[in-house]
Image: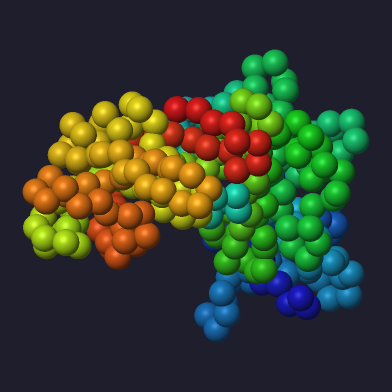
Amino acid sequence: MTTLLIPWGERAGQLVHVDAVASGSGCGCVCPSCGDPLVAKKGESRIHHFAHYRGATCNPETLLHQVGKRLLFERIVASLGSGVAIPIRWTCEHCHEEHEGNLIKKATGVVLEKSLGPCRPDVTLIDGNGSPVALLEIVVSHRPDPTVLAYAAERRIPLAEFHMAGTGDLDHITESEVLIPTKMDLCMRPRCPKCGKYLQKASLHVIGARCWKCDRAMKAALLTGLGGVRGPEALTEQERAVARENGVVLRLERGNTRRGQWKRMTNACGHCGAFTSTHYLHNFWHEIGPSTERMVRWLCSDCGGGMR
């Protein structure tokens, strides 16, 4: 990064946009990073921007980092003062779903470069007791300091990273109605009460199917989650009751093997009584969707715990 046409300067301790000041050296602005005087360039051929005097040695990456975190800080200060939420949306690295929330939901204050003992994040959101509830990092060329990552992970504090590649990313921080961090270490799913891991969603679905034997319409129940599809044998008694209330016929299938007798709960046709195996239900995968979901519970893939 050698050229940075940045539209923000500092005047009287506040960030100001180039469009809000006079053109030329009389703008009265200095660089937010190095403190050297700036020139406001507002010509016709290039976008309006501030420039250092010739010979300045200010690092453009450092400048972008400084302006980015201050703009983010000032936006949060304004939102906390007005009580207006800051919508935030991210793709979760834990469940791979898209989550949405309010960045300042749990915050009553915000501190720039707050010392947290072993680390000093760019921006720290705090609650009424002064405890951190979220950490925000502006990333230009290097990842956040390992001490920040460790502090957030050990205390289960959400950490959001906003990667800056140019001045367009500054516009996102100031102008976008919804903030979209490059990375957000937070999943909206509940944690396992036993081991603390994020739980996986298991959903009961009631789908429309056809009997393999008589080809008449029937209802079938299945459980999705933990990477696959399972049949009624994996349902709880309460979930089986819900399935029956929605037209599913469940019956106990029995059989014999060399190891002895076996039995399992299976979907059955209400007309001819034929059993439908879980393997056959994969043929109706396209029928599974939000409209077929009847109940949700949470399972832990690590320790086997869960919750409703």
250 or 288, nearer to the observer: 250
Instruction: For residue 31, say whether it is visible.
Output: no
Outermost residue toward the top in this view: 129
Name the residue at 19% across, 40% down.
249
Instruction: For residue 131, say whether it is visible.
Output: yes
Quarter holding the C terminus is top left
Tell me where residue 78 appears, x and y as whole percent: 55, 35
Task: Tell me which colouring the rendered structure shows.
Answer: rainbow
Tell me where residue 20 appears, x and y as whole percent: 55, 55
Numbered marks: total: 0
Tell me where residue 134 appears, x and y as whole percent: 66, 35
Quarter of the figure with residue 197: top right
Quarter of the figure with residue 1: bottom right
In screen coordinates, is 81 left or right of 5? Answer: left
279 or 8, nearer to the observer: 279
In screen coordinates, is 35 left or right of 248? Answer: right
Tell me where residue 122 appears, x and y as whole percent: 76, 44
Name the residue at 60% across, 36% down.
304
In screen coordinates, is 104 left or right of 285? Answer: right
Whether residue 143 is situated above or below residue 12 in the rendered picture: below
Whether residue 36 is situated above or below residue 185 in the rendered picture: below
